[in-house]
Amino acid sequence: MSETIRKPAVLVTGANGEMGHGLIDALAEIGNYSIIALDVRPIDESMKPKCSDVIVGDILETRLLERMQSEYEVHSIYHLAALLSTRAEFTPEAAHRVNVEGTLNLLKLAIEQSRWHGQPVKFMFPSSIAVYGLPSKEVKKKAGKVKESDWNYPATMYGVNKLYCEHLGRYYEKHYRQLASDNAGSGVDFRSIRFPGLISAVTVPSGGTSDYAPEMLHAAAQGKAYSCFVREDVRIPFMAMPDAITALLKLHDAPKNNLSTNVYNIGSFSPSAGRIFEIVKKEFPNAEIRFSPDDKRQAIVDTWPEDVDDSVARNDWDWRPEFDEARAFNEYLIPVIRKRYA
Ligand code: AKB
């Protein structure tokens, strides 16, 4: 039997996306897993040696998932594939298919895998601050750090999809086919994190509404002009990508008995767009950045909270960000981005 077959398999969907890159790097470095990478686009060449299998395919293709069912023994699924908030507003029905039906297909795969090998399948689901919907700028200001149960009235299709999938995951874990006489539970161990806007030094996101922060930074580092689509005073939580990856791995490894809920907020720093401009301008004084708010995208960001209360994650699985604002920029983003575009 080959080395890769003996290790428990981890399936990563959306493997070629921003988070997929970071996660696969980290999983490969840990070395305990055989990684199956799935993405609708071809996976970057640099990622292939880190994976035991690379599949180009759509999570909506049930035939593909059925084939995977018989070929692999999957113990954990990191379901990262999604259409983000800006893109989803242009094609809400397609977003529903990818974000909701895609998740349902993966949950089904998880159930069947668990039945097959007799152990729970951990289902890691990145949710988002987009599940919150604050009704006005005044309420947003007053709300401060929101708890998981506050303001669950998303204003975007993406937020609606994420909130619903959090509930789906909880249902699959705790109540699946609850009235069936042969009900033996689903075997799904559903764990979800509501991520803030993420900033990576190595990839630029696409299709999100928090993208102004990474876009500003990457444009400045490349000497490209940037027009920021939100107002200077707008504030939402952000996080450096390495912390997001650490959080996923940490929640994955946490003892189930310690987990008091299926869905957790996590936070690290919460700068205004003007503050990000200040930091970027200090590092790249020639950067040509101007603020030219797009009312519609601005309105979406206005519904997202200024900050999140992550005390439950801190208590249950010892969540602590390693990168506050200063460390994120000074020790990760700026040096790595400089090197990247040098
Ligand atoms: C987006 O902007 O859609 C995402 C998110 C906040 O979840 N980055």
Image (cartoon, rainbow, N blue to C red):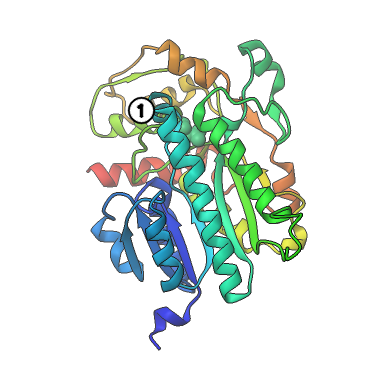
User: Is residue 30 something one can see in this rendering?
Assistant: yes
Choose between 192 and 202: the one closer to the eye.
192
Eyeballing the image, is 133 above or below 167? above
Choose between 72 and 247: the one closer to the eye.
72
Asked if residue 309 lies left or right of residue 25, the reply is: right
Q: Position of residue 188 (x, y in %)?
A: 63, 60
Mark 1 surroundings: few (<14), some (14-19) or many (≥20) residues within 10 A = many
Eyeballing the image, is 154 above or below 194? above
Q: Quadrant of residue 70?
A: bottom left
Q: Quadrant of residue 296?
A: top left
Q: Amino acid at mark 1?
A: Met
Asked if residue 147 lies left or right of residue 271, the reply is: right
Residue that extends furthest to the bottom in the rendered view of this protein: 1
Eyeballing the image, is 69 above or below 139? below
Total label count? 1
Q: Secondary structure at mark 1?
A: helix
Which corner quadrant holds the C terminus?
top left
* Residue depicted at x 75% and y 55%: 178
Q: Position of residue 164 (x, y in %)?
A: 61, 38
Choose between 37 and 278: the one closer to the eye.
37
* Residue depicted at x 73% and y 54%: 174
Which corner quadrant holds the N terminus?
bottom left
Asked if residue 234 lies left or right of residue 83, the reply is: right
Residue indicated by mark 1: 216
Q: Position of residue 258 (x, y in %)?
A: 76, 59
| Mark 1 CB within 8 Å of ligand 1 | no
* Residue depicted at x 36% and y 50%: 58
Q: Position of residue 262 (x, y in %)?
A: 69, 49
User: Is residue 320 something one can see in this rendering?
Assistant: no
Residue that extends furthest to the front in the rendered view of this protein: 181
* Residue depicted at x 66% and y 42%: 167
